[in-house]
Amino acid sequence: MKKGIIIVGCIAAVILIILPFSARMVRAGQRGVLLHWGAVQDKVLGEGLYFIMPIMSGVEKIDVRTLKLELKASAFSKDLQSADAIIALNYHISPLEANKLWQEIGGEYRERIIEPAIQEVVKAVTAKFNAQMLIEDRATVKKEIVDLLRDRLGKKYIIVDDVSIVNFDFSDEYEKAIENKQVAQQNALAAENVLRQKEIEAKQRIATAQGEAEAIRIQAEAISKQGGEAYIKIRAIDRWNGVLPTVVSGGEIPFLPMSNIELKRQ
């Protein structure tokens, strides 16, 4: 009886000693890769508490939440302009294939797989566009980078959620040339606007002159129809200040028809 109690006590003691070393907690956002004598097992452990045999078995934990990596990549554009791009990658590990990732790549998958893939993809995509297109058509550039990264990393059990092109930097000489070009374009646009305004003003002056000429023509026709001599006399009366000239050529005071004067007074 005592011997049985001793055996049970020893077993309990061993269990109590081993228990802390056999418990494994897989936390939220993680997956556990089960190892048996160092060999990766097919089963992927989800979130929760597990008990394994120490020494024989082990659990490697992999974060499967969305992670962010920001990396600088250098490349050359199609027109051979050097470009430094800052790429921000959001990614996560495929939860159901965490064991395969660990088996084929290990825990240093970021340095061994993701960072080299970003460098290669940025170089390949940048070489397809000239520098101006890289600046003006970022949506197309981004789409090609995303598609290539998803194709390459997806084969390694890494899921690409999104890619952002934080910045594209070119040489100081090229950026200065772009600035000068923009200034020249703005100056040309301003000159074009001035020329267009002058053309409008010239057309307005022509229209005004044509209108005045037409008015004169209509007035001349009316005078001609109504008798030009009478009209001239009326205009003379309109301009007379009522003072008779003191010196008259020929010694006679010019005769002013009273009918015209009465007409003017009326």
Image (spheres, helix red, strand yellow):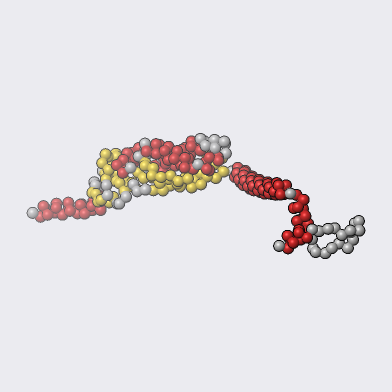
Q: Residue at x 50, y 41 (%)?
A: 137
The spot of residue 81 in percent (x, y) is: 57, 39
Residue 266 against residue 62 in the figure, above or below: below
- Foreground residue among 173 and 197: 197
Residue 130 against residue 9 in the figure, above or below: above
Q: Residue at x 66, y 47 (%)?
A: 207
Q: Is residue 7 left or right of residue 114?
A: left
Residue 81 visible to an observer of this rendering: yes
- Foreground residue among 60 and 93: 93
Residue 255 position by quadrant: bottom right
Residue 77 position by quadrant: top right
The spot of residue 71 in percent (x, y) is: 47, 45
Residue 112 against residue 238 in the figure, above or below: above
Residue 253 position by quadrant: bottom right
Residue 194 visible to an observer of this rendering: no
The spot of residue 230 in percent (x, y) is: 75, 52
